[in-house]
Amino acid sequence: MAARIPITFFAPAKREPIKVVHRQAGQLGRAPLTRSLLNASLNYLFLLNAQRQIVMASENVLELVPGKTMDDIVGLRPGEALGCVHANDCASGCGTTQICRTCGVVRVILSGLEGRRDMQECRLTRVIKGREAFLELRVLATPLVQDRQRFTLLAVEKSGRRR
């Protein structure tokens, strides 16, 4: 039987198995400074691997993902964790739909993975308790390399007012 080819209309669809993501988290988290730095910011911070999956995040990220734990979001992509209404429009998930081409979050992450620091604004639509809700965000991606692996530190700031 042939391997299933992931579908994408924008960003690469490939993901690492969760076991690999946990290994990456273990490697990055060995230094106590890593966790301290993640939690020292007023912004919400996500450390993403080259497949845009969450490897680690600051503790305050849980404020953005009601009802989820850190274990729930590790391995997900940011739009999936944040509940973006478009994250599941394509079987390959966040970043792979046609509408993702205009998403500031995906665009800055891709810049970060290409070695460029980038910042954009984004309006993420999600459904909370059956009602449409918006997150007005400013996002900054900073490229990182650790043990010859590419990562992106994604800083997220809520802006505007919540509807």
Image (cartoon, helix red, strand yellow):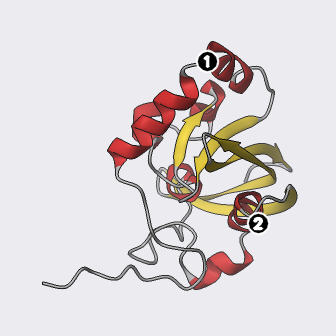
Which corner quadrant holds the N terminus? bottom left
Mark 2 residue type: Gly
Judged left or right of residue 135, residue 139 is right
Q: Position of residue 102 (x, y in %)?
A: 73, 77
User: Which quadrant of the view contains residue 126?
Assistant: bottom right
Q: Check residue 104 in the rendering and tell me which mark sits there, or answer none.
A: 2
Which corner quadrant holds the C terminus? bottom right
Label 1 element class? loop
Outermost residue toward the top?
A: 32
User: Which quadrant of the view contains residue 116?
Assistant: bottom right
Q: Check residue 31 in the rendering and tell me which mark sits there, or answer none.
A: 1
Query: Badge 2, how many Cα within 10 Å: few under 14, some, many 20+?
Result: many
Q: Position of residue 141 (x, y in %)?
A: 78, 52
Residue at (74% x, 22% y) in the render = 37
Residue at (53% x, 59% y) in the render = 51
Tell me the mark number nearer the camera, choosing from 2 and 1: 1
User: Which quadrant of the view contains residue 14?
Assistant: bottom left
Residue at (62% x, 34% y) in the render = 61
